[in-house]
Amino acid sequence: MLWCESAGTWSFKQHTQAQAQAVVASFVTWLNKCQSQLVTLTYQVNSATTIPAAQAIAWVNPQ
């Protein structure tokens, strides 16, 4: 069972093994992008020399 959305309603739905593996693979890809972005942004914040420079750094949701 996986938590998923259909027509705006979230519920647990039965999925095939292939579907579940595809979901997990997509999640891992997304998570790796988020982690890479976190590393980059952390470096940028730590390298900022002024408060406004640090405040200008923003998270952009990976697609």
Image (tube, helix red, strand yellow):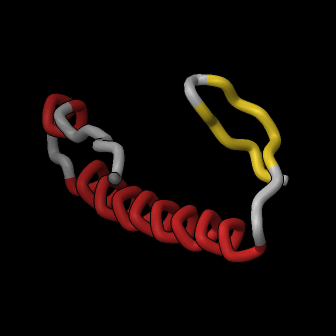
Residue 39 falls in image quadrant: bottom left
User: Which residue is located at x 75 percent, y 43 percent?
Assistant: 3
Nearer to us in this view, 19 or 24: 19
Q: Is residue 38 left or right of residue 7?
A: left
- Residue 43 position in % (x across, y down): 30, 61
In the orientation shown, which residue stands out farthest toward the top? Answer: 8
> Where in the figure is residue 20, as x and y percent of width and height?
71, 67
Q: Is residue 22 left or right of residue 50?
A: right
Q: Tell me: residue 41, above or below residue 16.
A: above
In the picture provided, is 3 more to the left or to the right than 51?
Answer: right
| As drawn, 60 above or below 33 | above
| Between 27 and 35, the one nearer to me in the picture | 27
Residue in view at x 38 percent, y 67 percent: 36
Give the left or right position of residue 61, taking residue 32 as reference.
Answer: left
Return the residue nearer the eye: 63 or 49. Answer: 63
Pick the residue in front: 55 or 37.
37
Relative image position of residue 51 (x, y in whole percent): 21, 31
Seen at 22% across and 56% down, the residue is 47
* Residue for point 22% across, 40% down: 57
Question: Where, by quadrant of the figure, is residue 54 drawn?
Answer: top left
Number of on-image labels: 0
* Image spot of residue 50 (x, y percent): 16, 37
